[in-house]
Image (cartoon, rainbow, N blue to C red):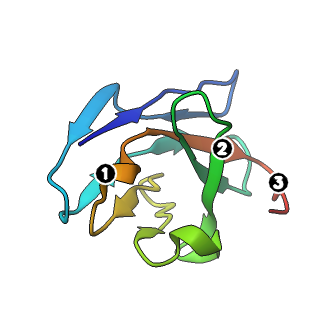
Amino acid sequence: MCLGMNTTLAQKDNVLQAKGEETAAAGGTVTLGCQYNSSSSNHYLYWYKQDGNNSPKFILMRYSGDDGNTAEEFKERFSSTLDSSIRSVPLKIQKLQLSDSAVYYCLLSSSSHKK
């Protein structure tokens, strides 16, 4: 299965994801990287999943370590920890399924958005 990654940039605050695809076997584990830069002391990092032409789906939000929230449908297999020392918030997907094939977006905000 292939999991796409996309890059989002802003003027001062940005996130960087590796371009291209990750290929992994069903039942396995994959980690999608996301590095960020921010001029704000408040870092809210979001992961979204987009299947085909469907609207992106909220997966999770992290603002410190494991703190944040994860959408109910993703809680069992999707996880992330925000490491502010290296400005990283990788998305780990376990027990991969064919339905996980999608484009994954990492987004940065200076404020929390209710889900």
What label sits on residue 108 in the rendered view?
2
Give x and y (percent) for residue 48: 58, 47
Q: Is residue 18 above or below residue 56?
A: above
Give x and y (percent) for residue 79: 45, 69
Estimate the spatial distance between the alpha carbons at disc 3 and disc 2, rounded to whole Å.
Answer: 9 Å
Q: In this view, does 82 lie above or below 24?
A: below
* Sequence order check, earlier mark of 1 and 3: 1
Q: Mark 3 points at which residue?
A: 111
Name the image quarter holding the C terminus: bottom right
Q: Nearer the viewer, residue 32 or 76?
A: 76
**Mark 2: secondary structure:** strand
Whether residue 70 is visible, yes or no, is no
* CA neighbours of label 1 inside 10 A, class few (<14), some (14 to 19), many (20+): few
Estimate the spatial distance between the alpha carbons at disc 1 and disc 2, rounded to whole Å.
Answer: 27 Å
* CA neighbours of label 3 inside 10 A, class few (<14), some (14 to 19), many (20+): few
Estimate the spatial distance between the alpha carbons at disc 1 and disc 3, rounded to whole Å.
Answer: 33 Å
Whether residue 18 is visible, yes or no, is yes
Q: Which of 41 and 9 is in front in this view?
A: 9
* CA neighbours of label 2 inside 10 A, class few (<14), some (14 to 19), many (20+): many
Q: In this view, does 104 lie above or below 94?
A: above
What label sits on residue 98 in the rendered view?
1
Query: Relative to residue 29, is residue 56 drawn left or right?
Result: right
Give x and y (percent) for residue 8: 58, 27
